[in-house]
Image (tube, helix red, strand yellow):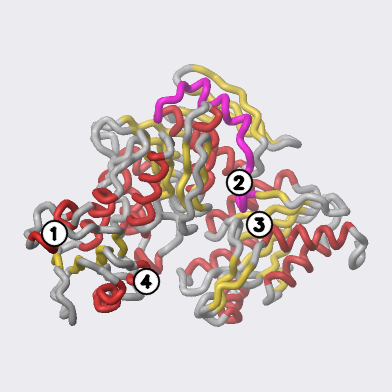
């Protein structure tokens, strides 16, 4: 694509406008010869400070929000909103899209809903993909795409991925939409066909400031990115979902709800725990369905039902959408079991990293635990400090014993983070700084009937300590600890 085609409303001289654009990036470290650099003002850095670096690396044009002085002759396109034009340029440079694009937002459950929706589409023999925290997962097409493990991708990664997926014949894609990504306009220039909402609870207040702003960022997915005739699937388990459903009544879109209320379009009549997972009884448009799901945690069943409703709204008949639920497989780091404890104790690894998510996990595990319910967790550094005491309180309230350890301390003092959690904790709390040691100690002390929930990091395979990114995998460490016990280690 020529520079004049990427910027059709900008006047270039003939030589400059004929230059071939090789890529678009807002990261000066990604700039190569022929790139267009978009200067974004971020939370920790200002892209305008890196314009010279971008030119030195080969940028042939800059997009900025203010005048910048450069030492080279390079066209500068000034705009009032770099983020919006960044997304628009990426959409123009990578123009191909799958036929159906869905997105899901909410505090907890986005990854599970996205992955469950991809699986449901796959069981319908539709080529499909999910993009989000776990990377890019593709079903039914021979393609791999290396993308960052972020909830919402930068516009260049997002539109590049969609272009490649569509080129490979993938017809349906579901995205995770984070509040950060929505507030920063990363989905601009991409109207959606289906959007889903899981729930809202305290998280990211270090970025949004208060719960009203946080809700507004989530709700923008439905107000700003769903065109007329599109569809929304809303879980109305909490007040935020109910509020959102009411707000969408005036819009010319299809709105379907899922919940326990009689008013829900997809009504949940019962979710019963079983030896293999859960039995679920639901009704939709007058039809009743009895479904067996091999999933741990009632909230995972709720996530699966939201995914099934989104699948229906994307064009799949209800009997196929709900029929595929019995074939769903657990997701990495989401109530993921670690089997083989020599005493038969249950061990689960989950991403629960908010007070609400941790409470839900412990509440839903409790009825099936005949022994002790033990939780191991920490809190991330450089993030919302207010939730640390809340999580300490939740653990003390709903677990029989808590191990307080490190999560991703980042630039904060790990001991100070643990102290904030411990201040709100009470009886049967153990502080073990090193997370590996904490996991090993907790697994070693388990008896028959006990259940250990290792919470907070889930699928993550690294730990962020200071400015270092260190290898760390809760599941791998737990498996090794169980294997050690099974082979007669310690006092197994």
Quarter of image, res 310 = top left
Q: Position of residue 448 (x, y in %)?
A: 86, 52
Q: Residues within 10 Å of mark 2 (few under 14, many from 20)?
A: some
Mark linked to residue 398: 3
Is the C-beta separation of discs 3 and 1 under 8 Å?
A: no
| Alpha-carbon span between mark 2 and mark 1 | 48 Å
First-in-chain label (4 vs 1):
1
Element on which disc 2 rests: loop
- Mark 4 secondary-structure assignment: helix
C-alpha distance separating marks 4 and 3: 46 Å
What residue is pinned by disc 4?
29
Q: Gap in Å between the C-alphas at discs 2 and 3?
A: 24 Å
Q: Is residue 152 above or below residue 323?
A: below
| Mark 4 or mark 2, earlier in chain | 4
Residue at screen point 74% across, 52% down: 338
Between marks 4 and 2 in the image, the one whose residue lies nearer the viewer = 4
Range covered by the magenta-colored residues: 314-335
Q: Nearer the viewer, residue 318 or 235?
A: 318
Across and down, in percent, residue 368 comes to 74, 44
Q: Which residue is mark 2?
A: 331
- Answer with mark 4 or mark 3, whichever residue precedes in sequence: 4
């Amino acid at each position: 694509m020529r520079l004049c085609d990427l910027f059709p409303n900008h006047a270039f001289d003939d030589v400059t406008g004929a230059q071939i654009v090789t890529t678009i990036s807002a990261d000066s470290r990604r700039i190569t010869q022929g790139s267009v650099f978009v200067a974004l003002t971020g939370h920790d850095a200002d892209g305008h400070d890196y314009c010279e670096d971008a030119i030195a690396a080969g940028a042939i044009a800059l997009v900025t929000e203010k005048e910048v002085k450069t030492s080279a002759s390079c066209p500068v396109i000034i705009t009032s909103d770099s983020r919006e034009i960044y997304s628009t340029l990426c959409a123009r440079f990578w123009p191909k899209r799958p036929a159906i694009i869905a997105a899901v937002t909410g505090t907890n459950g986005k990854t599970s809903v996205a992955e469950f929706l991809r699986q449901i589409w796959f069981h319908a023999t539709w080529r499909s993909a999910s993009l989000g925290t776990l990377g890019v997962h593709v079903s039914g097409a021979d393609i791999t795409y290396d993308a960052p493990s972020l909830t919402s991708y930068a516009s260049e990664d997002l539109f590049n991925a969609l272009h490649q997926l569509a080129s490979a014949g993938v017809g349906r894609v579901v995205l995770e939409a984070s509040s950060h990504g929505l507030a920063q306009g990363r989905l601009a220039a991409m109207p959606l066909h289906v959007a889903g909402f899981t729930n809202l609870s305290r998280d990211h207040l270090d970025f949004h400031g208060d719960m009203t702003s946080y809700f507004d960022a989530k709700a923008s997915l439905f107000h700003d990115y769903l065109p007329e005739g599109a569809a929304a699937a809303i879980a109305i388990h909490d007040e935020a979902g109910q509020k959102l459903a009411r707000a969408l009544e005036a819009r010319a879109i299809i709105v379907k709800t899922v919940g326990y209320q009689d008013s829900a379009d997809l009504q949940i009549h019962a979710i019963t725990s079983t030896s293999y997972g859960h039995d679920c009884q639901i009704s939709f448009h007058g039809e009743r369905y009895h479904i067996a799901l091999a999933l741990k945690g009632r909230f995972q069943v709720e996530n699966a039902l939201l995914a099934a409703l989104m699948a229906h709204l994307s064009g799949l008949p209800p009997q196929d959408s709900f029929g595929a639920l019995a074939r769903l497989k657990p997701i990495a780091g989401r109530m993921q079991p670690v089997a083989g404890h020599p005493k038969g104790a249950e061990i689960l690894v989950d991403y629960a990293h908010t007070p609400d998510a941790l409470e839900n996990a412990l509440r839903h595990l409790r009825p099936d635990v005949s022994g002790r319910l033990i939780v191991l967790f920490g809190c991330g550094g450089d993030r919302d400090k207010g939730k640390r005491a809340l999580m300490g309180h939740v653990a003390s309230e709903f677990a029989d014993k808590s191990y307080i350890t490190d999560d991703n301390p980042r630039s904060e003092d790990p001991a100070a983070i643990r102290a904030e959690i411990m201040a709100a904790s009470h009886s049967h709390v153990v502080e073990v700084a090193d997370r590996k040691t904490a996991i090993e100690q907790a697994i070693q002390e388990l008896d028959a009937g006990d259940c250990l929930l290792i919470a907070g990091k889930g699928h993550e395979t690294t730990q962020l300590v200071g400015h270092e990114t260190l290898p760390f995998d809760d599941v791998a460490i737990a498996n090794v600890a169980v294997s050690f016990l099974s082979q007669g280690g310690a006092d197994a």
